[in-house]
């Protein structure tokens, strides 16, 4: 496995295009000034020792040197020893509803954003656990298979929006089936499926899917987001969603469906509103689940690779010093540059 010990130094590479732009601008202005003194062909004949190509080569070598310096400071490393590390954790699959109704703002800042905040805080509590991420609306897709890569999990989570799924609706059954398929076959590890939805326009089969998940040793937690009073669904053009008659559509939380799914899945129903009680309750219940040693592959030793880069940097710097802008009379017979 390849990595950089100090990746922030790679930002020095930004200097290369910036300096190149300045250099090209200066060369353009220099050409314009030279034309004021006479024809370029005549000037070259009067100054045979001056070589513009050498100047370009020296600048190019300096840019290469800056790039190599940034690589040396970033300290490239290569993994040389791979170890199997045992961690004690659980497996958690999170299925998030991204249907249009989740844009409703009866829960601040919106049902979907509130859901993402809850999941993000939950991921921060994970240490040695594995998690997967599923998005669903009228259909369901697996965004992230079961993994310990929490950085990628947050990246996919931040990108969730109604456009993630092209088919609208709330197909909870498919979400449960897809999330369930991502678990390992181990029987002695705690496994939880966290379903986050407003349960509006729920299609059939959700209870049956939750029962099958329970039979497979998976607890189904349902986080219902929204209020019974509900609210309009904001659209991207600043208006609210309307029905065929032109009336503003009001989306309301269907708590009973959420409770039935949680009961069928042997888990817990948690209502998400403006307070943070749902977060605390969920973390407490997840913490009670049985943990088991999970084997993960990790690199435990790395070899420094910057020595080779430093050697190349030395060669480039020596070459830059040896190349002079004026032709050396001692090497006038060597036509490396015009």
Image (cartoon, rainbow, N blue to C red):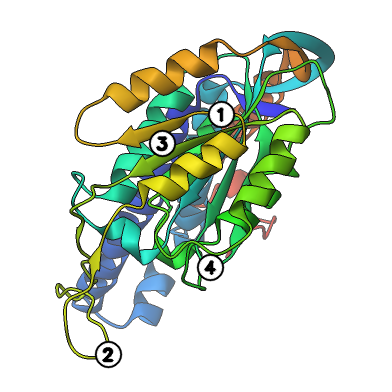
Give me the disc on residue 244: 2
Asked if residue 181 is positioned above or below residue 76 in the image, the reply reads: below
- What distance separates the C-alpha of mark 3 from that of mark 2? 53 Å
Mark 3: few, some, or many residues within 10 Å (few <14, many ≥20)? few
Image coords of residue 239 (percent x, y)? 15, 75
* Mark 3 or mark 1, earlier in chain: 3
Residue at 78%, 10% in the rendered image: 85
- Residue 36: where, in percent of width, then height? 18, 77
Q: Please identify, in this view, whether the residue under mark 3 or under mark 1 is nearer the observer.
A: 1
Circle 1 is placed at which residue position?
267
Question: What mark, if any, has residue 138 been given in the picture?
Answer: 4
Q: CA distance from mark 4 to mark 3?
A: 43 Å
Q: Which residue is mark 3?
A: 11
Q: Secondary structure at mark 2?
A: loop
For the N terminus, which image quadrant? top right
Residue 40 sits in quarter: bottom left
Marks 2/4: CA–CA distance = 20 Å
Q: In the picture provided, is 188 more to the left or to the right than 333? A: right
């Amino acid at each position: 496995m390849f990595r950089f010990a100090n990746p922030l130094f790679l930002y020095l590479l930004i200097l290369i295009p910036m300096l190149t732009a300045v250099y090209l601008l200066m060369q353009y202005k220099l050409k314009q000034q030279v034309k004021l003194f006479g024809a370029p062909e005549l000037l070259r004949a009067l100054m045979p020792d001056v070589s513009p190509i050498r100047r370009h080569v020296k600048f190019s070598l300096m840019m290469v040197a800056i790039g190599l310096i940034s690589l040396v400071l970033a300290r490239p490393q290569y993994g040389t020893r791979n170890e199997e590390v045992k961690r004690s954790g659980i497996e958690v699959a999170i299925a998030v509803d991204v249907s249009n109704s989740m844009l409703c703002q009866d829960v601040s800042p919106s049902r979907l954003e509130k859901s993402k905040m809850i999941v993000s805080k939950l991921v921060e509590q994970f240490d040695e656990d594995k998690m997967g991420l599923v998005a669903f609306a009228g259909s369901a897709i697996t965004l992230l298979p079961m993994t310990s890569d929490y950085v990628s999990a947050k990246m996919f989570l931040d990108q969730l929006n109604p456009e993630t799924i092209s088919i609208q609706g709330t197909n909870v059954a498919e979400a449960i089936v897809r999330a369930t398929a991502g678990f390992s076959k181990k029987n002695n590890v705690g496994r939880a499926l966290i379903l986050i939805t407003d349960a509006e326009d729920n299609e059939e089969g959700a209870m049956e899917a939750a029962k099958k998940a329970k039979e497979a040793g998976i607890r189904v937690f349902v986080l219902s987001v929204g209020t019974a009073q509900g609210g309009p669904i904001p659209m991207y053009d600043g208006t609210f969603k309307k029905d065929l008659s032109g009336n503003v559509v009001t989306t309301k939380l269907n708590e009973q469906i959420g409770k039935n799914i949680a009961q069928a899945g042997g888990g817990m129903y948690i209502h998400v509103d403006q307070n943070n009680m749902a977060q605390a309750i969920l973390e407490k219940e997840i913490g009670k689940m049985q943990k088991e040693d999970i084997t993960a592959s990790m690199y435990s030793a790395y070899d420094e690779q910057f020595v080779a880069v430093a050697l190349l940097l030395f060669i480039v710097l020596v070459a830059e010093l040896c190349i002079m802008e004026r032709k050396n009379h001692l090497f006038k017979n060597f036509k490396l540059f015009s």
